[in-house]
Amino acid sequence: MASAMLSTASAAPSASISMNNALKAKVKLGIGSLNSCFPNTKSFGRISMTVAVNVSRFEGITMAPPDPILGVSEAFKADNDETKLNLGVGAYRTEELQPYVLNVVKKAEKLMLEKGENKEYLPIEGLAAFNKVTAELLFGADGPVIKQQKVATVQGLSGTGSLRLAAALIERYFPGAKVLISSPSWGNHKNIFNDARVPWSEYRYYDPKTVGLDFEGMIADIKAAPEGSFILLHGCAHNPTGIDPTPEHWEKIADVIQEKNHIPFFDVAYQGFASGSLDADAASVRLFAERGMELLVAQSYSKNLGLYAERIGAINVVCSSADTAARVKSQLKRLARPMYSNPPIHGARIVANVVGDPTLFNEWKAEMEMMAGRIKNVRQKLYDSLTAKDNSGKDWSFILEQIGMFSFTGLSKSQSDNMTNKWHVYMTKDGRISLAGLSLAKCEYLADAIIDSYHNVS
C-alpha cells in the first residue's frame, strides 16, 4: 500500500515532525529537506511530497497463461467478425448455434419447485437417490456389481471434481503409483494429476499418419508400464480425437490390463451422447466390470443432460466385495470433506428425477438421440463439403469414422492459428474442433477454412 506524507513550511523554520517507525528519523521542514532523505521526493514551491511503497507479499506470483480450452471462448467473445465460429469448448448448440436446455430438465425442475424441496446440506457422499440411479445407469440396474453392492459411489463436482477426488485417493492409498494417460487426451487430465501430485506418463493412442488409433502402440505402452499402474481410458467418444477402440480392441485392452495387474480408470463424460444409446456407450465399462476387475469410473452429466453449470457427476469405485466398497466409500468421503465438504443439490435432484422416473427417462433418451443425431448430420455435411471442395484427392473419411462431439482434424498449431486469424474459427491448438458448436449452414464455410489452412499453411 502506498502512503503519502505531506509537509509544509511553518513560521518556525526549526520545526520538525516524526516519521514512521520504519524510518525512525526526523526530517526538517523546508525546501529540499525531504529530498536529502528521499531522492524520489518531488518539491512544489514550499510543499514537499514523498511516497513510500511497500513491496507486495505476492510479488513473486506470475501471470498464469490462458486456459487452452476456456481461453478460446474468451478470445471468441472479443472478436466482432460476423463470420466467427466457436468450435473450442465442448458444449452443445442448436442449429441456430444457441445454448440448449433440455425439455426434460425443465420438467424435472418444475417438479422440484412443486415439491417445495429445501436447500439443506447434502451428506458428504451426495444425494442418495442420485448415487443409486447414476451407478445403475453406468453398470446396468441388473449388473452383478450393483446387485452385489460392490460399487462405492460418491457424488462429485462434475467430471473434473470426480477425477480430482479419485486422484486424491490414488495419491493417499497407492503412493508412487503412476497413471497412464492417452496421447493426446483432454487437456485437464494432466492438470488434475499434477495438482494431486500423482505421477503420470502417456501411452500412444493417436496415429497422425492414419488420423486413427495407434492400437499396437497403445498395447505396447500398457504392457511396458510398471505393474499396478492406473490406465486412464475414455469410455466412449475419446476427447480430443473422437477415435474409439472397437469392441475387439476393448477385449484386448482388458486382457493386457488384467495380465499386468493394472487398474482401469475410466473417464465417462458422454454416455448416451456419443452414439445416442446409453447402453452402447457404457459397453466398455461393463466389459471390465463383468470380468470381475476392480476399477474406477468418473462420470459427468454436463453433456448428456446439458447440466454444464450444475457441476454434477460422480466417482465410482468397483471393488472385489461389498465390505471393501464400504471402506473405500468412507475414505472418499474423508477426502471430500476438507476439499469441498459436500456437493450441490440442484443438479443431483434433476438427475435423480429424470433417471428415476420412467416417463422422463424415456423422454431424455429421445432428446439425447436428437442431439447425437444433429451432430452426426453435421459431421456428414462437413465431410461432404470437404470432399466436394478439395480437389487434391485427400481422404477425409476419418471425419466420419470418428464419434461424439469432437473431430480431430489433423491440423497443426500453425494451421489452427490460420483458422482463427484468417477465418475467425476458434478451436484448440491441437486441431480439435467441437462439432456440437457447428451448424449445417456453416459447414461449407468451415470446409473452406480447413482446406485453405491444410494446403496453404505449413
Image: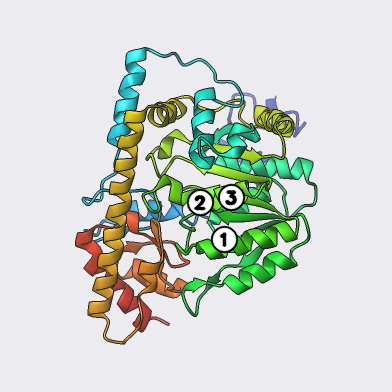
Instruction: Identify the image quadrant of residue 360.
Output: top left
Image spot of residue 311 (x, y percent) = 48, 36
Secondary structure beneath dot 3 equals: strand
Asked whether disc 1 touches disc 3, contact meaning CB atoms under 8 Å apart, the reply is: no
Kindly identify the amino acid type of the residue bearing the numbered disc 3. Phe
User: In this rendering, is residue 20 above or below 73?
Assistant: above
Residue topped by disc 1: 250
Secondary structure beneath dot 2 equals: helix
Residue topped by disc 2: 283
Kindly identify the amino acid type of the residue bearing the numbered disc 2. Ala
- Residue situated in front as seen by the camera: 322 or 454: 322
Say whether residue 178 is left or right of residue 388: right
Indicate which disc, 3 or 2, sits on the residue closer to the N terminus.
Answer: 3
- Residue situated in front as seen by the camera: 215 or 14: 215
Pick the quarter of the image with the C terminus.
bottom left
Residue topped by disc 3: 266
- At a point 40% along the width and 70% down the height, the residue shown is 409
Instruction: Identify the image quadrant of residue 25.
Output: top right
